[in-house]
Image (cartoon, helix red, strand yellow):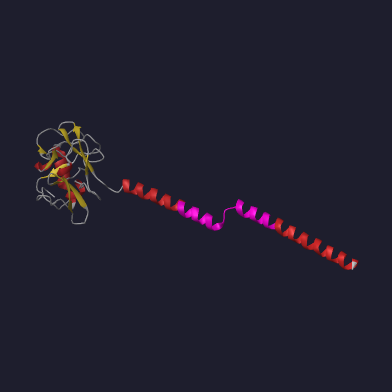
């Protein structure tokens, strides 16, 4: 009987030790697990960060998506006239048929159309209701103001220039009402006569010597 009691006590001691060891191991494992994020948590965090980064990039792209702004500015020699979002003077072309542009080919190279991917907006001095768009042959949308398709001039190298004014008698800067401004000398760089000669030599297409 005494031998059985000793054996039973020893067996219980071993079982107790195993239970204690098991509990200690579980505690260590639990501690280790809680201190290091699981791979699924890391993936979730990465996905969230990527999504937020993508949204930020999308907003940045939207801010530079080609939305045109037309405003007015003082330009030497011609007064307060319409300019594009970069401050470059814009022009109307008298041979255009209403809102339909007739400036293509060499004409388009010398007189780049003002285009927009979204709805154009009015800056200081411009009237929002006067703005619109018209589709060109290549599918791009050209900005119009008071029913006139708008263009810049390749002979203008910086804001404040209007070297295309009255070129060939068909190109005019515009006032805030969207009317052609006649008279006034170019603000610098080239004269109206030399820009006309340059444009006529450039290529073919469109009207007014193109």
Residue 9: give x, y in percent of width and height: 84, 63
The reply, left or right, for residue 55 in relation to residue 142 is right
Region of the chain picked out in magenta, as a range: 25-48
What residue do we see at 72% from left, 60% from top? 22
Residue 190: name its quadrant.
top left
115 left or right of 58 in image: left
Residue 88 sits above or below residue 9 on the image: above
Q: Can you give x and y, in whole percent of width and height, for residue 85 in the image?
A: 25, 41
Residue 53 within the segment the image draws in magenta: no
Q: Is residue 26 left or right of residue 47?
A: right
Rendered location of residue 25, percent (x, y): 70, 57
- The image quadrant of residue 93 is top left
Please, which residue is most extreme toward the right here? 2
Q: Quadrant of the N terminus?
A: bottom right
Q: Can you name the residue that lies furthest to the front here?
A: 1
Q: Position of residue 105 (x, y in %)?
A: 18, 53
Residue at the image position 45 percent from the left and 52 percent from the top: 50
> Can see residue 108?
yes
Q: How many marks?
A: 0
Q: Nearer the viewer, residue 191 or 146?
A: 146
Q: Quadrant of residue 3?
A: bottom right
The prevailing secondary structure element of the residues shown in magenta is helix
**Residue 30 drawn in magenta:** yes
- Does 162 appear above or below 41? above
User: Residue at coordinates 53% horizontally, 55% vertically from top-left?
Assistant: 41
Q: Nearer the viewer, residue 34 or 143?
A: 34
């Amino acid at each position: 009987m005494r031998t059985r009691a000793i054996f039973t006590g020893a067996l219980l001691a071993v079982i107790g030790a195993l239970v204690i060891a098991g509990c200690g191991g579980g505690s260590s494992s639990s501690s280790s697990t809680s201190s290091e994020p699981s791979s699924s948590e890391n993936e979730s965090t990465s996905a969230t960060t990527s999504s937020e980064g993508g949204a930020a990039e999308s907003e940045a792209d939207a801010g530079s998506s080609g939305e045109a702004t037309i405003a007015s500015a003082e330009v030497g020699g011609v007064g307060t006239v319409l300019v594009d979002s970069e401050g470059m003077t814009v022009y109307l072309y008298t041979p255009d048929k209403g809102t339909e542009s007739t400036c293509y080919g060499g004409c388009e190279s010398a007189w780049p159309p003002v285009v927009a991917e979204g709805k154009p907006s009015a800056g200081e001095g411009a009237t929002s209701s006067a703005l619109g768009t018209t589709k060109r042959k290549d599918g791009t949308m050209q900005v119009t103001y008071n029913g006139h398709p708008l263009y810049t001039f390749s002979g203008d190298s910086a804001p404040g220039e209007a070297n295309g004014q009255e070129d060939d008698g068909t190109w005019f800067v515009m006032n805030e009402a969207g009317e052609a401004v006649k008279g006034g000398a170019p603000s610098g760089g080239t004269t109206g006569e030399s820009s006309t000669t340059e444009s006529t030599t450039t290529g073919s297409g469109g009207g007014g010597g193109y």
